[in-house]
Amino acid sequence: MSKEYKNFINGEWVDSVTGETFENRNPANWDEVVGVFPKSNKEDVDKAVAGARHAFKEWRLVPSPERGEIMKKAGDIMVQRKEKISRVMTREMGKVIAETRGDTQEGIDTAYYAFGEGRRMFGQTVPSELPNKFNMTTHIPIGVAGLISPWNFPMAIPTWKIFPALTCGNTVVFKPASDTPATATLFIEVLLEAGVPPLAINIVHGTGTAVGIPIVEHPDIDLISFTGSSQVGKIINEKAGKSLKRVSLELGGKNAEIIMDDADLHLALEGALWGAFGTTGQRCTATSRLIVHEKIYKKFVDLLLESTQKLKLGNGLDESVDVGPVVNRGQLETVHSYVEIGKQEGATLLCGGEPDETGDLKKGFFYKPTIFVDVNRNMRIAREEIFGPVLSVIKVASFDEAIDVLNDTDYGLSSSIYTRDVNNAFRAMRDIQAGITYINGPTIGAECHMPFGGVKETGNGHREGGWAVYDFFSETKTVYVDYSGKLQKAQIDNR
């Protein structure tokens, strides 16, 4: 019998008021039900927000170093449960166990970083223009945070949001992706065991329409953090803007790796394979475009084809597997539709291009790693986010052309260049329009203590990760202390 899960609302594990449920299944074996979850609605959201609003009154007064210590304890618990969490994650979203262990480790690292930031909520002391007056800034909590996370990093991305939100003194209403609710529930259990007050953290399962939008529109939610598609992000920004909520959006990408003629080709090959086919291409930072200098184009494409054809597809719990399934049938159909578009546009299909239904793979949603060559920058497969194991290879004649092609997209999340030329490396850092640039590394591989996010349609200017996210989850308050004993007028011409 499948395990039945609940929401955690207002300090209690409860079913949805709807009485309805949905199944969470293993994309590597659709016959396996991971769990049954409540299919919630606006009334459930209202109850969660009421609890979070009540808890904020006390949680905001807990010193931030003490809040940070709770985050550290959560990290310690996650260390003990790392394998359990990782195996559940692989079962519900498919990526290989080595990657889900990395996903869990990112959450652990984020917990420990939050522990440190609890003692580094630095303000500034600034000289006053007037005598006997002291000026400073400090960080204060904002209120109730509505947090909406995607399915491709079911532990890392929720920790990127929830740890800093709580450490800054906010309370949380959390809607995880419907494809990965079990990992999210394990995380909430960790937070409660670590000592987060029960009313301060709420999880409401359900769809974006029934749960996500009510969170965004709720008048008692003060800020929203969303990771997902640019299309949905625009809707959220519009709805939240009506009440002037603070909104952080981390959205899509069409990331490119440039390989110059002076690159270490074997290093670049490793980066291309990992960037394109790690997480089955289901990362916002995935390498979906490969921009290769014409002098080494044929040699590199030959190496790429040979290595790609050796990748092993299968259930991610098998340690020998390189590439797991896509997350569900809808995603499989989306990937295949883009492959058909690529062929219609005149690109040459080098390998892959179809689902793999051999043997046990027919039980899941497996798609062969796919490479297109003879791609030009104007093709849809070179411009639109596919979110699957599809790589488009574009030939260029120079460094300047490579940068121009890389920038010719609506997105600007991650980017990469392989070169031994230090001058071109620094020009790339300056001229690439992206929030992240790797030199001699793939487009994937964020570190928790560094800001993460992009430009253009990849987001709205905020960053997750590192110190920057603590600015988002707190309000800067300016404080003046006048100890002169008399009225002093700033903003008046005293000179």
Image (cartoon, helix red, strand yellow):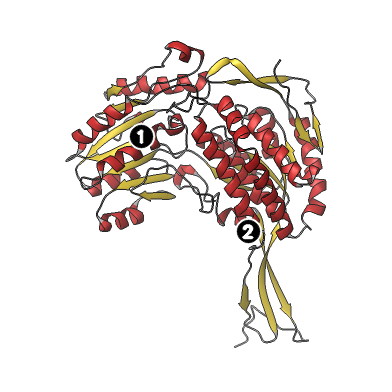
> Can you see residue 395?
yes
Amino acid beneath label 1: Leu
Q: Whole-Å distance between the Cαs marked 1 and 2?
A: 35 Å
Location of residue 86 (image quadrant): top right
Give residue 273's mark.
Answer: 1
Residue at the spot x=27%, y=49% of the render?
419
Give coordinates of residue 45: x percent, y percent: 75, 34
Relative to 118, is 24 above or below?
Answer: above
The quadrant of the rendering that contains the N terminus is top right
In the rendered view, tell whether residue 395 sits above or below residue 88: below
Dot 1: within a 10 Å radius of its alpha carbon, few (fewer than 14), some, or many (20 or more) residues? Answer: some
Inspect the image, locate mark 2, and give the three-letter code of the amino acid beneath it: Glu
Residue 193 vs residue 355, the one in the foreground: 193
Q: Residue at x 68, y 27 (%)?
A: 206
Residue for badge 2: 117
Q: Position of residue 32 (x, y in %)?
A: 60, 16
Provide the secondary structure element on which disc 1 rests.
helix
